[in-house]
Image (cartoon, coloured by chain):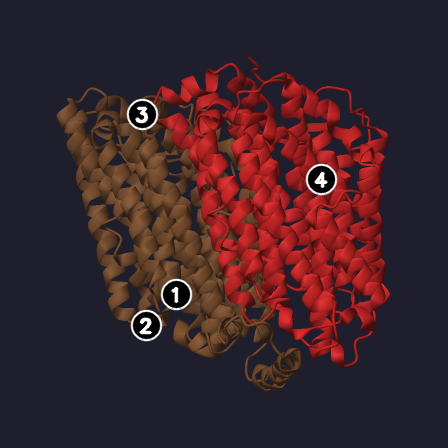
Amino acid sequence: MTACPILSIAIFAPWAGALLLALVPRASPALSRALALVASLSTLLAGFSAIARFDPNAAGYQLVERHAWVSALNAHYCLGLDGLSLVLVLLTGIVAPAGLLASWRQPREVRLFGILYLVLQGCALGVFLALDFFHWFLFWELSLIPAFFLIKLWGGPGASRAAYQFVIYTLAGSAFLLLGFVALFVASGSLDFDELSRLAATGGLSNRLAALGGFWPKAVFLGVFLGLAVKVPLFPFHTWLPPAYAEAPAGVSMFLTGVMSKMGVYGFLRILWPIFPSEIHAAATPLLWLALGGVVLGAFAALRQRDLKRMIAYSSINHVSYCLLALFAVAAGPLKSAAVASSALGGAILQMFNHGLSASALFLCVGVLEARGGGRRGIGDFGGARSAAPVFAGLCGIAMFSSIGLPGLNGFVGEFLIFRGVFGIVPWAAATACMGVLVTALFYLTFWQRVFHGPRAGVSAGAFPDIAGADRVALAILVALMFLFGIAPQLLVGLFNPLVTAWAGGLPTP
Amino acid sequence: MRLLPWTIYLSLAGAMLSLAAGRRSAAAARWVALGTAAAAWGLVLAAATGFSPSALPQTLVDLEWIPSMGGRYHLAADGISMTLLVLTGLAATAGILFSWNIGERTGEFFAFYLTLIAGVYGVFLSADALLFFVFYELAIVPKYFLIAIWGSTNREYGAMKLALYSFAGSALVLAGLLWAYATGGAHSFALADLASAAARFPAGQQVAMFALVFFGFAVLAGLFPFHTWAPTGHVAAPTGASMLLAGVVMKLGAYGCLRVAMPLFPAGLAFWQPAIAWLAIIGILYAGLVALVQDDCKFVIGYSSVSHMGFVMLGLAAANPRAVAGAVLQMFSHGVIAGLLFAVVGRMVYDRTHTRRLEDLRLLALYRLLPFAATVFVIAGLASMGFPGFSGFPAELSILMGAWQASPLWAAAAALGVLIAAAFTLRVVQLTFFGKSGDGESPARSGTSEASADAAWLLRDRETQARSAALSPITWPERAGAILLISAAVVIGLKPDLLLNWIVPSLQSPLFRAVIKGGAP
């Protein structure tokens, strides 16, 4: 393969940046921040060069790099790109530098922060690009370490406990995931996602698993499902998320919600659905209820929060559950037409990207509020901030409306496509999910009204400078992108539409 | 390859030289010991570069020894031996580096140490059952003295218990071997000859002989319920000795099971297989749960060793190529990781703080006072959990796959052990190094005062500076030893083929094919 290994470069560039940061003998905080930012931006560069070489209409994976790795386990170093991964790589390329900019004024141990952040970024890219379980699981697990330390060492007062809960939950899920793949390997001799999905499509995989006992295909499915469900997180495995997101520092929360939550959804689309199509179909109704639980209960829980960061955290659960709602609806069937399925799936991918943008923007905003408030971030601690900081209020408002799903902003397109698709398959689920949209609007408008509107009160009564410097740059860019992808979603959709159409085309329609 | 037997002779010579050098000065003894261990390891690595893996062991030396009994001085090496020889050299060198601070009777310490190493090299190279047994016994005596003289908690009791259990186990082994020898009538102790003779024994006899030999070796491997000597003994031992004992000597037992018990008595394995698997699984789970509630961090590591050896024994019990290859890889991996864990807890922490109680350590917030040690312990902990990127992951993955092939229930139970390992590892890392930041969690209100949080950091810094003056800095031998072991864990974690390419062909040997069955699906 003489082609440039862009995907490997994409993953290793942030790690190279981390190594450089670790080795430079006396890096001042300013140098550390600059170096980290440059290394983080490498992903965007890699993403654009990937787009240049990417043909959306070609079937299968592109820019593939595959080398033998552990021959005894038939494990390969395998990276590949399709529309879904490309969108997520672009998302990482945008959210990661934004998170670093949001942490620009964080004064403690700047160098270590940068190192851990870059390692985390590389791991996330690895999850989105690896196509062999041995390779993929390495990144999946490795991402926990920097995330743990980022939360624990720079987080709020309950950070330690939140970090441990996060890690233990995810490790427990991963143990089930690992066992599931042990079974899949013994049944098929392969750890490659593509090979496994091809074997599953013919029904051969279920047969081989069932050779040991009729319940094993379902048990293995359950194991893999649990590992992925904890990461998304899917209700009711979500309880680790609000503390973790709330206690983490602003920049880290941005990355967690923007990128890491997508790792779980990606896992559903890339692993669970292709390898267990019939099991997902059989379990679709309970799964739909779980997704709806996340949508509705997540929204209601957000409504009840006083802590603004927890509010956005529960809102994240709500938004990400829409993606799974779409997937489970498509898996449930019966599908009247392929267009309905492609609408739902396309909406899910778009929603992943758009939620990444809007949620990280909102965490940035709450981070600004927290900084102004000397650590306080209760909904009652502010008031009338709009008159003190008009630019900030404007940008924050746009981010909120994007998250609500206002047409014209990016959040609308994904949600619309999802609802259109799900209405066409399981209308009762779509109707129930509408409650989520309504309640989301409710709590965001309450947030806006209590914090920005009315007379200046609480923290905003004192000195409340407008958003400036790195914060302003990051938020402005994110908001600009919200407009861009709200008005011209085709820029993104064009990258994955053929893929989604192909997926939908492969599904059974009566 | 021909140089491999010199690892034994070099170690013995080094033992005597160390003793002599010790009379001059402690430093002389240390350097002689380090030089010897490194040289022996160097021989192994040199042999490794020229090693081409084959099914049959390659004979290195074959001389007449005790003609009246048919015992020959027969040394041979195959891929499995090579893997364990590399481990021995690495663990020995690292162990000596971490024993750099032994000041009392230094020459004698390293003399016993190197004698133990010589015995271990001998076991891994023996192809004659009698010779195997002699080297095995040779390794027991120095263990007693190392613990009894230079040990800590309960050292006389720990040393005695360890030595007695080891002798009892080897007595069982001897009984089984002599029985097989006498019944076979082949007048030879060569493993191959014993195997072909034993193949003709009735199944009932094989079952009984297997029980004697396998469970005799399994005592040293720490198979439940014969494991109780291990936590006591390893906790009592000085750091360098714990590293060697948990890291390498426990593997002697598992190696004996694999090399001697299994090929000689396949019918015996077939009979005892479920029992061994379940004892291994109980060991994994029970030892893990016990580790979870310990107050002494060294006991946590001691019990974690029993838990990890349970994985090895499960791999052997599953008796298919994937599981056994994983078991051998796990032997290597755990040897390195146990070495790291004992090194941090014993040398880096206990020698400085003089306490191993987690209740005390949690108040010290050692990650600020000993950042290097904290980093090493975190890495060692991750490796111990079987985290991807470290050698434990491909090993445990392979064992799980092999176990699933034999019985999915075994794999599921073992996977639970992985979870328990994560739990006790996180706990011991958190309490030993990251104590203070774990406490002081205020209920999540709508905000906290960031100003007071800053002040707390600053205050902690001043306290830290005052306290760190009292703790001696990490010395160069400790750094060197830690980097050596971590590199091994990472290199094999990322490229396990380096060892698997040796191990897998060895399992094709005719001696193994009768007992290790079931290829790729």
Are the residues at dot 4 and dot 3 in contact (C-beta closer than 8 Å)? no
Q: Earlier in the sequence, mark 2 or mark 1?
A: 2
Based on the displayed image, in which of its 4 quarters is residue A434 positioned?
A: top right
Q: Please name the residue that numbered disc 2 is placed on.
A: B153
* Residue A163 locus on image (x, y percent): 54, 61
Q: What is the crowding at mark 3: few (fewer than 14 residues within 10 Å), some, or many (at least 20)?
A: many
What separation in Å lies between label 2 and label 1 (alpha carbons)? 10 Å
Mark 2 belongs to chain: B
Q: Please name the residue that numbered disc 1 is placed on.
A: B298
| Tags 2 and 1 both on a single chain | yes
Are the residues at dot 2 and dot 4 in contact (C-beta closer than 8 Å)? no
Q: Please name the residue that numbered disc 3 is placed on.
A: B515
* Residue B43 locus on image (x, y percent): 55, 45
Mark 4 belongs to chain: A
Tell which chain the image draws in brown.
B
Residue placed at 76% from the left, 58% from the top? A397
Identify the disc placed on residue A263.
Answer: none
Amino acid type shown at disc 4: Leu
Amino acid type shown at disc 1: Lys
